[in-house]
Amino acid sequence: MRWVESGDVRLAVFEEGDPANPTVLLLHGYPDTHRVWNEVATLLRDRYHVVRYDVRGAGESTAPRDRRDYGFDHLVADLGAVIDAQGASRVHLVGHDWGSLQGWEALGRAGLRERIASFTSLGGPGLRQTAHFLRHGRRRDVAVQRIKSWYIGAFQVPVVPELAWGSVMPGVISRTLRREGISPRPGHPAPTLARDGRNGLWMYRRNMGTDGDPGVGDVPVQIIEATRDAFVTPALLASIGQWVPRLRHRKVAAGHWAHRSRPEVVARLIAEFAQSAEPAPAAPTTSATFAASNAPAAASAASAASNAPAAPESAAGSAVSATSAAPAVRWERRAFEGQLVVVTGAGSGIGLATARAFAAHGAEVVCADIDADAAGRAADAIAKDLGGTGHAAQVDVSNIDQMEDFSRNIIAQYGVPDIVVNNAGIVIAGSFLDHTVDDWRRTIDVNLWGVIHGCRLFCAAMVERGEGGHIVNVASLAAFAPSRLLPAYSASKAAVKMLSDCLRAELAGHGIGVSAVCPGFVSTPIARNATYVGADLREEAVRGLARRGYPAERVAAHILRAVHRNQAVVPVNLEGKIGYALSRISPGTMRALARWSGTIRNPGIGR
Ligand code: NAI
């Protein structure tokens, strides 16, 4: 430990690792001390020169003589003094909670900003960005954020919070930590907790009205969103994109103290980001791409997805190939930049349109299909038409061995996917009495088991990685609309929808969203590809779907929006929405319609 003077305050500064390595400066929040970072610092010190200090009035640092000297001018001057004392020209700054607020403030100040090579915020945006959000955000989002920030008002009250720190607050902190699965250990909570809590109240009292230009210059910023953080809403986080030209947004399935409960994930994200922001990275940086996940971008994602260009029918692919026309580190602000997306059934129809839509918005896409040529064409077209990164893979989703190999290869080659779209499906149409056992088996194997395999294999990896993710299961209007012509298909899709609901409940705690997308009739080759048992309705069905004129690209736009908004069930197009509403309001009407369906020239394939 060494002391750094800043005004009338002596800051306790702690260093680990080789000073010749790039410096990572970890800034703690309220009411913590530098020791809250112990685990993360241990994980980083082999590769980085790790610097921490106790903020004025906390831990071993002294408090200012005038207790009002907790304004940002003082806090940011402390930060500058610590950076100067390192002798390093620039640091990778990492801030949690109030440490993050100080980091944002530093980014807003010319002179100090230039000393920050990258900034990782484990917490919310800065106070200037928050002030803008509270003035201009959607009224409902603002109200939710205000409710979550109730304690800020309470801290402004004189004397009472000081008394609380001397009585109940240390117990409240311990209970909150335990609720997050964090056991107390030496240093956290700190033995100085009550005093630190009392002193730190002045940070709230001196800075809460901070307003002004929310711009932060050109410093690369990484937001690590703790998905169970009780204090910061996703809407507030999403608003940051407008201020940061180079933004990466990652999630960690954890509560407020993610650096205590998931230190290995937080350390990895810090290291990845710092490495990508170094001027001349020695190692490849394939995983370090930067995302702007904000509402306007997602809205444009949805609309542009519906305008995605049609796929060319040329260029044969191979069983497993990779085509990449994009640079390893991208700074564009597209909605799915830097995300890895797996789409099954990507060789045709909805899967093809979805793969292209994700690629058009910056994602690296694995196009998987039982038809190797179709998968290859889809991946090639992503590179040629969209300048994106597409990988082709041949897999039969109903085959457990193939799916296990597939998921293992994808994770080994490209990493754990951020988004998996279980879309591959088949239709066998005809009456129940005309379905053979084999017809049932094929339908359930592809439509249900294919989804189960996709969920099981990729969700396990997502949970282990600890950064959340999203699963989209393509069900159908048939999931809630019974029909005389599609007994096996409808049963399989109803199961997919229920599976999605169950998974959504189970995986929410891991920061993994699950959406069941339920389109009505969509004009894809599905009717041509279907098997007809009993009466041959192929030509009628093909004509019927073509006449409907609802393009797969519009379903893709719904899928992108479902991921962005984490929607549970997404009925798509008019008949999809009416069917969904009727199934809830009047299931009897749905049953009556089922008796009618298929009795006249209404094959209803694919819905
Ligand atoms: P499509 O027939 O155009 O495309 C399906 C793709 O899945 C094809 O490329 C096919 O090769 C692939 N595939 C089939 N079996 C596979 C397997 N075992 N393993 C891997 N890939 C396999 O069909 P469409 O319309 O694009 O359908 C996609 C999904 O959307 C399906 O799950 C379907 O049930 C669902 N859906 C379609 C509707 C429609 O009207 N087209 C309506 C509602 C849902």
Image (cartoon, grey):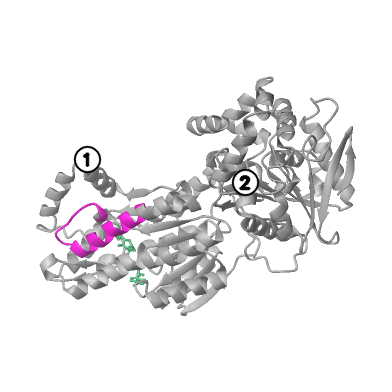
* Left or right: 244 as drawn, with respect to 47: left
What's the residue at 27%, 68% (across, down)?
444
79 w.r.t. 442: above or below: above
Q: CA distance from mark 2 to mark 1?
A: 43 Å
Give the residue drawn at x 24%, y 43%: 584
Coordinates of residue 363 in the picture (x, y in percent):
53, 60
Say whether mark 2 is within 8 Å of ligand 1. Answer: no
Q: Residue 489: within the magenta?
A: yes
Tell me: 290 left or right of 195. Answer: left
Please name the residue that numbered disc 2 is placed on.
Answer: 257
Q: Earlier in the sequence, mark 2 or mark 1?
A: 2
Depth check, front residue: 516 or 150: 150
**Pointer 1 residue:** 585
Drawn side of residue 14 relative to residue 439, left or right: right
Whether residue 395 is visible here, answered yes or no, is: no
Count of residue discs:
2
Amino acid type of the residue tagged 1 in the rendering: Ile
Q: Which residues are magenta?
A: 479-501
The answer to which image quadrant residue 236 occupies is: top right
